[in-house]
Amino acid sequence: MKDPQGVGEKFNLETYMAARKVARRVAFLFASHMEEGMDEEQGHAILEELLKKNGVDKKWHPSKFRIGKNTVKSFKEKSEPGVKLQKEDIFFLDIGPIIDGHEADYGQTFTVGQNAEYAHAQKTSKLIFDQLAGEWKVNKLTGSELYARAAELAQKHGYVLNENMSGHRLGDLPHALHYRGKLSDFESTPLENLWVLEVHIRHPEKQFGAFFEDILV
C-alpha cells in the first residue's frame, strides 16, 4: 500500500477539480428533470444520459438514486422496487464519474413539494457536512474524530447517523492504491481535496433520510 495521503504521478489538481465541477453540475441538472410519478429506474436512465452529455463515459462506482423510503438505505443495499416520486417527496443521488483519469464523487439530497420534515432533513445533512468541514479545518480532526463528531451532531439535530456511510479516499484512478478503508477509521488528519466526507442521516422513527457528500476542501 502506498502513502494513504499521496497521489499518483499523473495526478493533476486542476483536472481533478474540473471533474468535481462536472459531478456537481450533473447533480443539479438531474434534480431539475425529476417529475411526480418517476421511479428509480427512470431516474437512473436520465442520470446516465446526463453523465454522457457531460463527457462522462466511465464511473468508478455505480450511480445511486434513492426515493422516499429508500433514502434510508446504505450504498450497497438494494432499493425496494416500485417506489415512485410523490407530489411531496425526498430523494438523493450519489455519482462517481471518472474524467481524464481522475475521480469525482458527489451526493446531494433534494425535495419536491412543501413537506417541512423532508426539507429539514435535506438542510440538516448539508448543515452537518459544513460544520464538520469547518471543525476539520480549524481543529485538524482525524477521520475517526470527524465521524464521532458527526454522530453527535446528527443526534443533536434529531437524527441518527448511518455509520456505514463513512467516507473514503479519492483522487487519480484508482484511489484504492493509496487507501482502501473508511475515512472513519483513519487516525490522521485527512489532507484537503483527497478525502470524501459522507453524511447520511435518518429519521429515528420515519422511513426517510438525507445524504450529502463532497471532498474536504
Image (cartoon, rainbow, N blue to C red):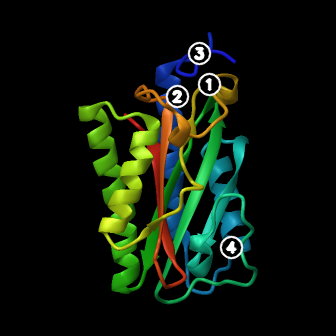
- Residue, disc 2: 16
Disc nearer the start of the sequence (1/4): 4
Disc nearer the start of the sequence (2/1): 2
The reply to whether the C-beta atoms of the residues labelled 2 and 1 are less than 8 Å apart is: yes
The reply to whether the C-beta atoms of the residues labelled 3 and 4 are less than 8 Å apart is: no
Disc nearer the start of the sequence (1/3): 3
Residue 172's label in the rendered image is 1
Q: Marks 1 and 4, how far apart in space?
A: 30 Å
Instruction: Choose mark 1 or mark 3, whichever is in front.
Output: 3
Q: Is residue 28 visible?
A: no
SS for tag 2?
helix
The reply to whether the C-beta atoms of the residues labelled 2 and 4 are less than 8 Å apart is: no
Image: 70 above or below 22: below
SS for tag 1?
loop
Pointer 3 local density, CA inside 10 Å: few below 14, some 14–19, many at least 20 = few
Residue lying furthest bottom in this view? 87
- Residue 161: give x, y in percent of width and height: 47, 62
Image: 26 above or below 38: above
SS for tag 4?
helix
All told, the count of numbered labels is 4
- Residue, disc 4: 40
- Residue 78: give x, y in percent of width and height: 75, 68
- Which is more toward the observer, 147 or 125? 147
Q: Left or right of 81: which side holds 105?
A: left
Q: Left or right of 134: which side holds 201?
A: right
- Which is more toward the observer, 201 or 98? 201
Disc nearer the start of the sequence (3/2): 3
What residue is at 63 percent from the left and 68 percent from the top?
A: 73
Instruction: Choose mark 2 or mark 1, whichever is in front.
Output: 1
Label 4 is placed on what type of residue?
Glu
Q: Marks 2 and 4, how far apart in space?
A: 29 Å
Residue 3's label in the rendered image is 3
